Image (tube, rainbow, N blue to C red):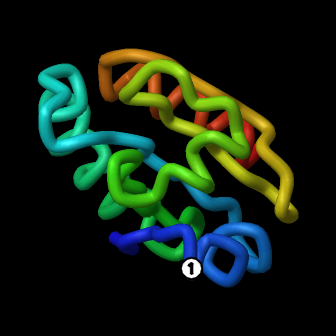
Amino acid sequence: MVDITDQNFAEEVLKSEVPVLVDFWAEWCMPCRIVGPIVEELAGDYSGKLKVGKLNVDQNGQTASSFGIMSIPTIMIFKNGQPVKQMIGAQSKENFKKEIDAVLG
């Protein structure tokens, strides 16, 4: 799991050779705390096929605002430097997997 920041976003996400799942979250957000362990499991499940990272919106507001993040948790999947999927709110692991599998083809 990668700690994504305003400073390393371009390198870790936009220039990544593999699709990247970014969890936009904050410490104080209860639904984010529910999603956090699921995101960690997904990182293991998709190891080698999908890069998984977390971006704290309180510490990295520039990136969050540039993608119009209004609600957290927001999970975005980037492919070839472009956002291709966005999921807002706490969801089941099965739902995240369905969306990831659709992106990975």
Residue 74 place in picture, x, y as percent: 48, 30
Three-letter residue code for mark 1: Gln
Q: Which residue is mark 1?
A: 7
Residue 91 vertical placement versus 104 (above, below): above
Which residue occupies 50% across, 50% down? 61
Residue 81 vertical placement versus 85 (above, below): below
Q: Work out whether residue 42 or residue 105 is closer to the camera in this orientation and state it.
A: 42
Rendered-image quadrant of the C terminus: top right
- Relative to 1, is 24 on the left or the right? right
Which residue occupies 68% across, 31% down? 68
- Relative to 105, is 1 on the left or the right? left
Which residue occupies 71% across, 75% down? 10
Residue 2 place in picture, x, y as percent: 39, 74
Dot 1: within a 10 Å radius of its alpha carbon, few (fewer than 14), some, or many (20 or more) residues?
Answer: few
Which residue occupies 79% across, 38% down? 84
Q: Work out whether residue 67 or residue 88 is closer to the camera in this orientation and state it.
A: 67
Q: Work out whether residue 7 or residue 34 is closer to the camera in this orientation and state it.
A: 7
Residue 60 place in picture, x, y as percent: 45, 58
- Quadrant of residue 59 in the image? bottom left
Rendered-image quadrant of the N terminus: bottom left
Residue 47 place in picture, x, y as percent: 43, 70
